[in-house]
Image (cartoon, grey):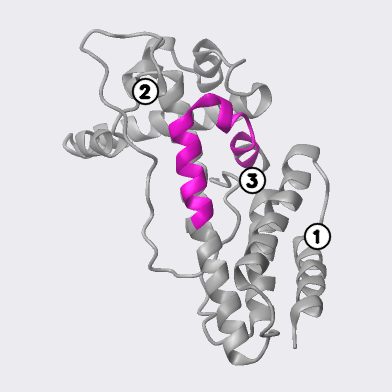
Amino acid sequence: MPYLTTGCLRLKPEEPLKRPPALPRPKPGAMGPARLSGQSVRMNMVLKYERLRKGNEGEVHRKLSKREAIIEAAIQVFSRKGYHNTRIEEIAIQAGAGKGTIYEYFSSKLELFHEVLFTGWRNFEENIPLEQIENMSVQEQLHRTISAHLRYFLENRQLARVSFWEVEAVDQELLAWTLKIKAEKEQQMQALMEKGIARGELRDDLDPSVISRMVCALIPYFAGCIVMNDVELDPQELSKQITGAIINGIRK
């Protein structure tokens, strides 16, 4: 999701899923579009889920279904128009709901945008298979990582496109969140490079931090080709070529 231009696939299944920073709740009665900064409108979405679960099962299902419909509509509209050019009314029409219904679930367009990005990231983490790759060669791990990324973006173009829209311009806290994720993924890729050097698979005169950043920069580049330019690529074949180019340049 997200891709969120975060770079590399998580390599450890136990890594916890983290949400972006929660925003304080708006003052009672403050309905309608928020005119405040990102810091003053961000809500705690986890608490919202907990409130829904306290109701009866049918009501929870109805609320979650409507909420999911709103998020799906937001994905479609944001992916076409970007954040700043999208109006809540357009999302409501796309969702088949009233404008007021949107505000029953999200306090502002910014909160909804946050949830769209988190939904993308969560789906990305949940849908990419986490095979037991610990004992595979570095080349095979790289190939699977890159292929999984590209395949996900190819199959989820609209959702991924949202993550390439205006994240930096929309909200600085959201940008900080994405950069933190990116740094974590680079650290994981660096650990893989270090393991390859220790195993004797990669040259020991290389700086693993440089190689990990190079790999993590390649993934969003090709993802952008797929998402923003509608380029038709074979994820498996492209991943094989990228991996081959990397490994042939750094292997022992």
Q: Secondary structure at mark 2?
A: loop
Q: Would you say the magenta stretch is mainly helix, strand or loop?
A: helix
Q: Nearer the viewer, residue 111 or 75?
A: 111
Q: In the image, what residue type sits under mark 3? A: Asn
Q: How far from the left and from the top, in percent, is residue 160?
A: 62, 42
Q: Nearer the viewer, residue 155 or 82?
A: 82
- How many residues crowd around disc 3 within 10 Å: few (fewer than 14), some, or many (20 or more)? some
Q: CA distance from mark 2 to mark 1?
A: 38 Å
Q: CA distance from mark 2 to mark 3?
A: 24 Å
The tag on residue 156 is 3
Q: Which of the image's four quarters has the C terminus? A: bottom right
Sequence-wise, which precedes: disc 2 or disc 1? 2
In the rendered structure, the answer to whether residue 190 lies left or right of residue 112 reads right
The tag on residue 234 is 1
In the rendered structure, the answer to whether residue 89 lies left or right of residue 210 reads left
Determine contact: label 2, label 3, CB under 8 Å. no
Which residue is depicted at the point 26% across and 33% down? 48
Q: Residue furthest bottom?
A: 200
Start-end of magenta stretch: 160-183
